[in-house]
Image (spheres, helix red, strand yellow):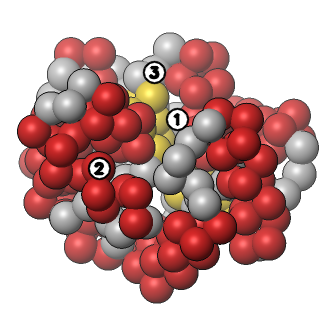
Amino acid sequence: MNLLVLGPQGAGKGTQAKRIAAEYSLPHISTGDMFRAAIEAQTPLGLEVAPLLASGTLVPDETTIALIEERLAEPDAGGGFVLDGFPRNLAQAEALDSMLTQIERQLDAILFFDLPDDVATERMLRRAEAEGRPDDTPEVIAARLATYHEQTEPIVEHYRATGKLVPLRAGQSIAEVWQEIQDALERLDDAA
């Protein structure tokens, strides 16, 4: 099962993607986690992306696309994956579509976590406090949400046209969103 999670920051994508990965034995491929690990390890990639993430700016397409291409080629992703944090703009979505076509795979579903900005902001501020994440300040959150609306939201329509977009009400509790996800994935299994 090849899944993509899509939605604004703070919508619970990472929480649910990790649960899907554990429940269905799929690797959770998170660009945010990969970038943060590179920053912590002070790799060349980490040094490149650290100032971008700190300011709420997107990492250049070619850097992110290359990272995802490498990750999808790893053996554990052969049976499926949960992709989180990529694509972030239409060019990346088209690159992902092309990449998947080249390796003769396709997305089975795009889980769209729909969440109002005020709820997303509140959640990210709580997460910043709980996890001590320096990249979640009110200014950076506002910049990230503006970037999301400008660059990432158009991807929703790109994927809606495939008939594989599954809208989720991300403002609900974690358990309620999980139930919506399970129902959607069961329908996928039944259709297969």
Q: Looking at the image, do the residues carrying marks 1 and 3 touch, with CB atoms under 8 Å apart?
A: no
Q: Amino acid at mark 3?
A: Leu
Q: Where is residue 158? Give x, y as percent.
A: 42, 75
Mark 3 vs 2, N-terminal side: 3
The residue where tag 3 is placed is: 26
In terms of depth relative to the viewer, which is nearer, 102 or 54? 54
Which numbered marker is on residue 192?
1
Q: What's the distance in space between the residues labelled 1 and 3, CA to CA?
A: 17 Å
Which numbered marker is on residue 50?
2
- Asked if residue 45 is positioned above or below residue 96 in the image, the reply reads above
Residue at image location 46% in from the left, 85% down from the top: 150
Q: Looking at the image, do the residues carrying marks 1 and 2 touch, with CB atoms under 8 Å apart?
A: no
Q: Amino acid at mark 1?
A: Ala
Mark 1 vs 2, N-terminal side: 2
In terms of depth relative to the viewer, which is nearer, 62 or 53? 53
In terms of depth relative to the viewer, which is nearer, 186 or 44? 44
Quick one: SS at disc 3?
Answer: loop
In terms of depth relative to the viewer, which is nearer, 118 or 154? 118
The mark closer to the camera, 1 or 3, is 3
Quick one: SS at disc 1?
Answer: loop
Q: Residues within 10 Å of mark 2 (few under 14, many from 20)?
A: some
Residue 121 relative to residue 35: left or right = right
Q: What's the distance in space between the residues labelled 3 and 2, CA to CA?
A: 28 Å
